Image (tube, rainbow, N blue to C red):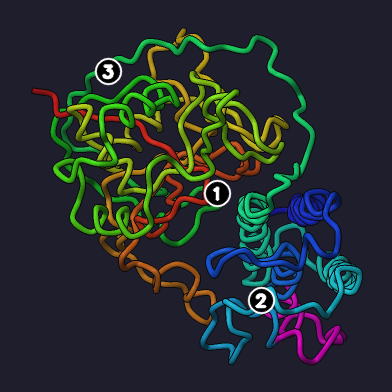
Amino acid sequence: MPAFTLAGLYSHTRATTAALAAPLSDADATAQSMTEASPAKWHLAHTSWFFETMVLKAGLPSYQEFHPQFDYLFNSYYESIGERHARPQRGLLTRPSLDEVRAYRTHVDDAMTRMLAQLASHDQSEFAKLIELGCHHEQQHQELLLTDILHLFAQNPLRPAYHELEPPLAQPSSTPTPLNYTAYEGGLVTMGHDGSGFAFDCETPAHPVYVQPWRLANRLITNAEWQEFMADGGYQNPLLWLSDGWAYAQQAQWQAPAYWQHDPQEGWCSMTLAGMQPLNPAAPVCHISLYEADAFARWAGARLPTEAEWETVARAAPLQGNFAGSGFLRPLPAPPLTQDHPAQLFGDVWEWTSSAFSPYPGFRPEPGAVGEYNGKFMSGQYVLRGGSCVTPDHHTRATYRNFFVPSARWQFTGVRLAMDAA
């Protein structure tokens, strides 16, 4: 990768993260609302820790670390690097302050500028690859910063807004595009990244997969359709649920997607990054678990797609959609269907698949500490595809594999249905 392209990616990524954190106070950025979520201040520091630890300490001899204890405070899960602060206690780090964390970011950025200037335009070194990985890693944390802030603000009775409801919808829609299915022949398909351009290790290697003929829905499931599921007793019928899902739903007392609240005057509302807002019935349902998505699919007489089915369709579709750069930061109704391919394959909400997050044939973790990035999480998690309304622009692709435990609901997760061809 040319040095100026790499430097440009680094600069843009770091500036975007800073802009996302700009509306937050020190208190906003310090609090931790649950174990799975991290404070915004921690995201800001950890992404800097990645460049400091993985790149600067080994690749820039003149580098002086910012603080000797930050290596302990802001390591996430890299066992091979050393001990770290316990994840459930990240919200107790009232110090360093938000200003000091920003100074840490500036310190790292200054050193990275010096190092990037040393890389030749044709550099293909491990450091160049690590810097590129670090940028994509930080883009993942940009999304997490927003989803974690949404969860934090949802705990506040004031229901504060992270941003104003801008830009407004040009033509607010309450009538969804009719749901139908496109048939696909099946057969031997190629799955996984072919090695051209960046990809995370879990997307590789490319390999053949045989799929039976199937059908895929032309759009995501909407809030209105989810309300039909609720009204028909979807959360009360154990015959619709996986055993683990039913047990989890009963224990957690799920009766609706996360962040939904019924108001006597407004009807159903949902907590968003713009505060509590009335549900748009035509917008995609989001903040649902794999368990709920699977139960809904069974109720609808359908199923969740496999990741091979989803990827086969997505490879032929344009990589465009409602991502973070649109400024909406919320899922939008499906546009009028004018193409042969399904709508909303990219953006709006991450789409649960029925596929467990497991290694592809021939997968090998990267050598060194970065080998801990994805491979060691290939147990007990399910794959999601497509990206969401808070995914950075140009971050996702047809082969991208997101993954979460099946009970997770705080991400922008939704559902697209599939069926067997028969």
Q: Secondary structure at mark 3?
A: strand
Residue 7 in sight in this render: no
Q: Residue type at mark 3: give it.
A: Thr
Image quarter where the N terminus lies is bottom right
* 134 is higher (above) or lower (below) than 59: above
* Residue 65 at x, y percent in the picture: 83, 86
Circle 1 residue: 197
Q: Earlier in the sequence, mark 2 or mark 3?
A: 2
Tell which residue pokes out farthest to the left in this image: 422
* Residue 127 at x, y percent in the picture: 67, 71
Task: Say whether residue 54 is magenta.
Answer: yes
Tell which residue pokes out farthest to the front in this image: 264
Label 3 or label 1, whichever lies nearer to me, is 3
Q: Earlier in the sequence, mark 3 or mark 1?
A: 3
**Region in magenta:** 51-71
Task: Say whether residue 282 is magenta.
Answer: no
Label 2, label 3: how many angstroms apart (C-alpha)? 46 Å
The disc at residue 253 is none
Q: Earlier in the sequence, mark 1 or mark 2?
A: 2
Q: Residue type at mark 1: give it.
A: Gly
Q: 264 or 228: which is nearer to us?
A: 264
* 295 is higher (above) or lower (below) than 230: below
Circle 3 residue: 182
| Residue at position x 66%, y 64% in the image | 134
The disc at residue 90 is 2
* Residue 257 at x, y percent in the picture: 44, 41
| Residue at position x 45%, y 26% in the image | 223
Q: Secondary structure at mark 2?
A: helix
Label 1 or label 2, whichever lies nearer to me, is 2
Residue 292 in sight in this render: yes
Label 1, label 2: how many angstroms apart (C-alpha)? 35 Å
